[in-house]
Image (spheres, rainbow, N blue to C red):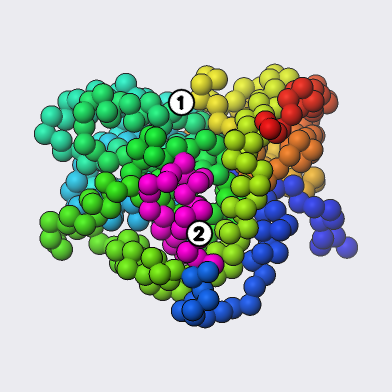
Amino acid sequence: MAATRRPGRNHLFVPGPTNIPDRVQRAMIVPSEDHRSVDFPTLTKPLFEETKAVFGSTEGTIFLFPASGTGIWESALTNTLHRGDTVLTSRFGQFSHLWIDMAQRLGLNVIVQEEEWGTGANPQRIEEALRADTNHEIKAVMTVHNETATGVTSDIGAVRKAIDAASHPALLFVDGVSSIGSLPFYADEWKVDCAIAGSQKGLMLPAGLGVICVSQKALKAAESSSGPNDRLAHVYFDWADHQKQNGAGYFPYTPALPLLYGLREALACLREEGLENVYHRHAVLAEATRQAVAAWGLKTCAKEAKWNSDTVTAILVPEGVDAAAIIKHAFVRYNLALGAGLSQVAGKVFRIGHVGDLNELSLLGAIAGAEMAMLDNGVKVQPGSGVAAASSYLRENPLAKS
Ligand SMILES: *Cc1c(COP(=O)(O)O)cnc(C)c1O
């Protein structure tokens, strides 16, 4: 009889959902409770303050929605923009594509700068487009910070500089779903008007809690609607409804209670490690992964080192090899979940997610498993080469900065 149980722990190395620390998992085992009770704000009020740290913000306003990251994209667009408004964005992977698709379906006029997959937002092109927009038709610039499909990180500080260099008043919306909590993010310094995060990646929680950090400028944009007809419809994601209740620690509807307890614990984990150490750990683990890829003689989807993401590495398999077969085999044979190639890169890449709660040895398990799955599928890598390269890099480079 075929076994129905996969023994041992599943090695979860998709770039979201990510591994949940045991203490965060335990913190979510709570009885249901009255979310209108006098006690409830003891949990919630500090969350609105403490969550700002992962956004690199003290000035922003946090909203917490029972939603995934996609819902928070919608929240940013619909609260601040009007039907027919023009937005400027770049497409270089499946997530930037999906956000564009949403903006178009909402009735926005989307100017898309096509960038090669494996690269990211081009600040110079953005600046040129903004300079040419002398009437300030462009109301917002939308950028995906970390394109999870290709393992590419864009330079948001440079995008901000481009907007400022053009002296353009457009809002800046940044998708930080697979970066916030794992990669350095400075919403105040970069003047990000809507910074978008989801719970199941850097925040080490299950999916279901959408988080947005909103600037004063974006809150003003949300207030100055020019009439009900040309507003983009939004009810569930309306910030004003939340603002009326959040100050006292309540929500306009039932929050996902266990996730709020989980968020409190996850933020405590990040604080105890220290955000600088968290960011450094991701940089070291990512570099170790890239050393393994180089030792295998393979290439990443990211075209140049400056695009390398420290939360996910997309690895190009040799011509004639089906990356999907490697992913399936890794799961069935070695209980290792690798990320699939999406859309344009389907079958061409597999992804190792190194985002959230992981360390040297968990990463080495994934590298060993990827290596075995590739060998089993006819990829002629030198057995042990990836593990050797990654482990020697890790021995030289401690995870903690301080
Ligand atoms: C995962 C992800 C999303 C989508 O988030 P969901 O929580 O799946 O809705 C959006 N953008 C990026 C960059 C992501 O990695």
Q: Are circles 1 and 2 on residues that touch, CB within 8 Å?
A: no
Viewer-side residue, 394 vs 86: 394
Residue bearing mark 2: 47
User: Does dot 2 land on a helix, a strand or a loop?
Assistant: helix
Answer yes or no: is residue 264 visible: yes
The residue shown at (23%, 47%) is 108
The disc, 1 or 2, on the residue closer to the chain's N-terminal end is: 2
Answer yes or no: is residue 332 visible: no
Write down the region rendered in magenta.
43-66
Residue 157 magenta-drawn? no
Q: Residue 313: image x %, image y %?
A: 61, 32
On screen, 41 above or below 296? below
Q: CA distance from mark 1 to mark 2?
A: 35 Å
The residue shown at (16%, 30%) is 133
Q: Check disc 1 and give the amino acid type.
A: Thr
Q: Residue 76: image x %, image y %?
A: 33, 51
Tag on residue 361?
Answer: none
Question: What count of labels does the image hold?
Answer: 2
Mark 1 or 2: the one toward you: 2
User: Does dot 1 land on a helix, a strand or a loop?
Assistant: loop
Residue bearing mark 1: 119
Q: Residue 317: image x %, image y %?
A: 64, 28
Viewer-side residue, 113 vs 170: 170
